[in-house]
Amino acid sequence: MLARFLAAIAAMVVVVAASNVLVLYPLQVQLGPVNLADLLTWGAFTFPFAFLVTDLTNRYDGPRNARLVVLVGFLVGLGLSFYLSYHPLPWNPQGGSATTQRIALASAAAFLVGQLLDIAIFSRLRAARAWYLPPLAGSLFGSLIDTTIFFSVAFAPALAGIDLLFGIEDGSLAFPAPWLGIGPGVPLWISLASGDFLVKFLAALLLLAPYRALMGRIMPLPPLGARA
């Protein structure tokens, strides 16, 4: 259905835009000895919803439509991300560049590879007897590759040349921080990546509930269309 397809694209745009902006803001919360700013960004809480949108689209409208939702949602969401980055926001009242070219490149590569991997795994496991296996496996592996690509490209000092190529200051997060807030000192980008994946891992489990709830509420396409 066209309405469902457009709703999926709109949802993906919101997730992409929110995640691209919020990944720049550490979670400033102190839990005992653990400073969550060394562990998490706000983007970790919004991005997992992309897998929910993709998996529901894949289940009811097939992998071809799921890939279209990912591509269109990404392109529109990325444009919206740049707009938000250069305009005053409640958490960034001065506006200014929050999303650099390096972060945009990292986001593009991570999002597209992670989502396409999720679609491929979901499609391979579509016939599994356990209803939770396709979305759970797809989300976990997709999240793992997404986190690895994004934080490596965006913040690892080994790729600082990307910033220099665009003539901007090195945005690498190489200064030390406790791993997961309590472990030995590691570069901040590694701690952030570890915390990000842990949140996505928990989110993959928690989002099985709305996935299951929506399974019986969405009218699927005819079988031929579902396998387009």
Image: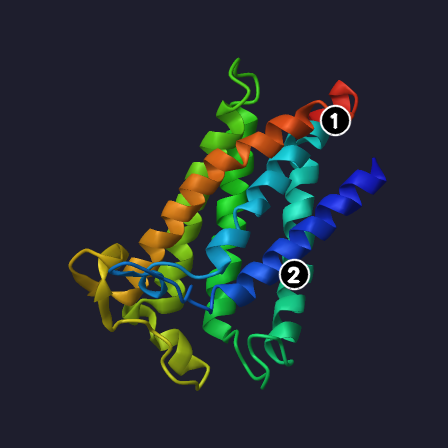
Q: Residues within 10 Å of mark 1 (few under 14, many from 20)?
A: few
Q: Which quadrant does the N terminus fall into?
A: top right
Say what amino acid the circle numbered 1 marks. Answer: Arg
Residue in view at x 71 percent, y 22 percent: 216
Q: Residues within 10 Å of mark 2 (few under 14, many from 20)?
A: many
**Disc 1 marks which residue?**
217
Real-space Cα distance between discs 2 and 1?
27 Å
Viewer-side residue, 133 vs 154? 133
Q: Residue furthest front?
A: 32
Marks 2 and 1 close (CB-CB < 8 Å): no
Percent from the top left, x then y, of residue 213?
65, 27
Viewer-side residue, 79 vs 25? 25
| Secondary structure state at the residue bearing disc 1 | loop
| Secondary structure state at the residue bearing disc 2 | helix
Residue in view at x 54 percent, y 31 percent: 208
Query: Comparing marks 2 and 1, which lies closer to the viewer?
Result: 1
Residue in view at x 63 percent, y 81 percent: 88
Q: Which quadrant does the C terminus fall into?
A: top right
Residue in view at x 72 percent, y 26 percent: 226
**Disc 2 marks which residue?**
77
- Looking at the image, is 76 positioned above or below residue 199? below
Say what amino acid the circle numbered 2 marks. Answer: Gly
Q: Residue furthest left?
A: 184
